[in-house]
Amino acid sequence: MHTLNDELIEKDLKYIWHPCSQMKDYEELKPIIVNRGEGVNLYSIDNKKYLDVVSSWWCNLLGHCNKRISNALKQQVDTLEHVIFANFSHPKAIELCESLSKVLPFGLEKFCFTDNGSSAIEAAMKMSFQYHYQTGNPQKTRFMALSDAYHGETIGALSVGGVDLYSEIYKPVLLDIIRIKGPDCYRCPYGLNCQNCEAQCIENAKESFKKWGDECCAIVIEPLVQAAAGMKIYSPKYLIELRKLCDEYNVHLIADEIATGYGRTGKMFACDYAGISPDIMCLSKGLTGGYMPMALAVTTKKIFDAFYAPYSEGKAFMHSHTYSGNPLACAAACEVLKILKDENIIEKAQQKAVYFNNLIKEKFSSHKNVGDIRSIGLINAIELVYDKKTKQPFESNLRIGYQIYKEALKEGVILRPLGDVIYFNPPLIIEKNDMDYAVNTAYNCMKKIVD
């Protein structure tokens, strides 16, 4: 019997090129047609429930179809759907900036609206370059970034990324980035870990700044968690030392908090762990609770002032996006901040994280193929290796993580892996019973594949 689900799958495969996918895989693993969501769960059109412990690519902050965010959108859509953001504004954009300015690190007070995370990175990079050009440093034309970084898919953002899976084929057309060997706490060359180190690996950055600092505009980093690299977590001390280097060499620190912001690490922003403020911070994903595409590049008055001049001087930041400051997205973003405050979401998530972290360690740590378990906030990652003693990874063609992902889907858990790193990055509202089910399912599916 040919069902509606079958018909939609056929049409999907006929028309749609899915992101970050080898479409040939879809011959075996058909697309799952979702038609509703509630809380931490998604429901397919044939009424199967899926526990979304990856927050639909880390953006769903407060659960699917959150009533407060939905109502805020419903009210806004009947009032104003969009307005050109050049020379025009609207109440929700102003409210959002005012509210965010109260929780952002000190000095971040000028808001440049874009419509996705990659675009925010592009805006930040252009802003930094133009600032230096207009303040007497035209030689500053290059950017620094860490190894294993990920900052998005547009050309500038992809350039500062360092994960070859995404960027290798495009290297002939990418910017010439100064690549700094970043922290690697699991395979630390100093034999330390991020709980007891003094960020000795900052030496790599010091060498690069000494050699190239005078020709660099900025360094782009993911604070504390290199997400796409496998949720690689490093010490806040590294950020503190990096901030000092940036100040010494007049290099902007661009903090990509797109994946780490909004309570994902247990604090509002990952930079808060280090007590530092970047020169530019990029925000997206949790910004609207996963409801609407929107991003921000937030900067200082010092940077803003370098662009503030008579029009005839040609110093304006001529960067724009059609949907900059979209009222629907702003309405969702305003409501997200209210919910975080009214319901003490981040504080409650910190308490849940203790249970979640301990549960995962108890379940996974003794397994022969679990090389590392790392966590910060509700983010938890389990790195699977062929040899636990030598930390030798599995052969990539085995696709161990992908095999586990397929098994977990059968049990109604979305465990989209990062290579052979199985991770959890759930909505902040997740409760213990769902944590239990997710962890037990992940463990059982892992045993099916690697035991």
Image (spheres, rainbow, N blue to C red):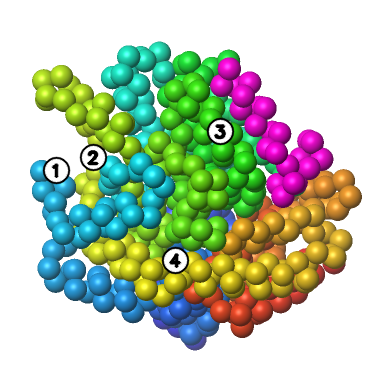
Mark 3 or 2, nearer chain start: 3
Q: Position of residue 160 (x, y in %)?
A: 50, 33
Position of residue 298 relative to residue 83, above or below, is: above
Give the residue displayed 59% in from the left and 22% down from the top. Answer: 208
The magenta stretch spans residue 191 = yes
> Of the residues under marks 4 and 2, which one precedes in the sequence?
4
Residue 90's spot in the image, x, y percent?
14, 56
Q: In front: mark 3 or mark 4?
A: 3
Q: Earlier in the sequence, mark 1 or mark 3?
A: 1
Q: Residue furthest right?
A: 389
Whichever of callouts 3 and 4 sits on the residue coming sooner in the sequence is 4
Whether pointer 4 and pointer 1 mark residues with C-beta atoms closer than 8 Å, the reply is no
Residue beneath label 3, please?
Answer: 242
- Say whether residue 222 is left or right of residue 198: left
Span highlighted in magenta in the image:
188-210
Mark 2 neighbour density, 10 Å: few (under 14) some (14–19) many (20 or more): some
Mark 3–mark 4 distance (CA, rounded to whole Å): 30 Å
Secondary structure, mark 1, is loop
- Among the two numbered marks 4 and 1 on one chain, the one whose residue lies closer to the N terminus: 4
Considering depth in this image, is 364 or 214 the residue closer to the camera? 214
Residue 320: numbered disc = 2
Give residue 86's mark.
1
Mark 1 or mark 2, which is nearer the start of the sequence?
Answer: 1
Check whether the beta carbons of the residues at disc 2 and disc 1 lie within 8 A of each other. yes
* Residue at disc 2, secondary structure: loop
As drawn, 128 above or below 107 = above
Label 1 neighbour load within 10 Å: few <14, some 14-19, many 20+:
few
Judging by the rendered image, the residue that carries numbered circle 4 is 60
Contact flag, marks 4 and 2 (Cβ < 8 Å)? no
Q: Quadrant of the C terminus?
A: bottom right
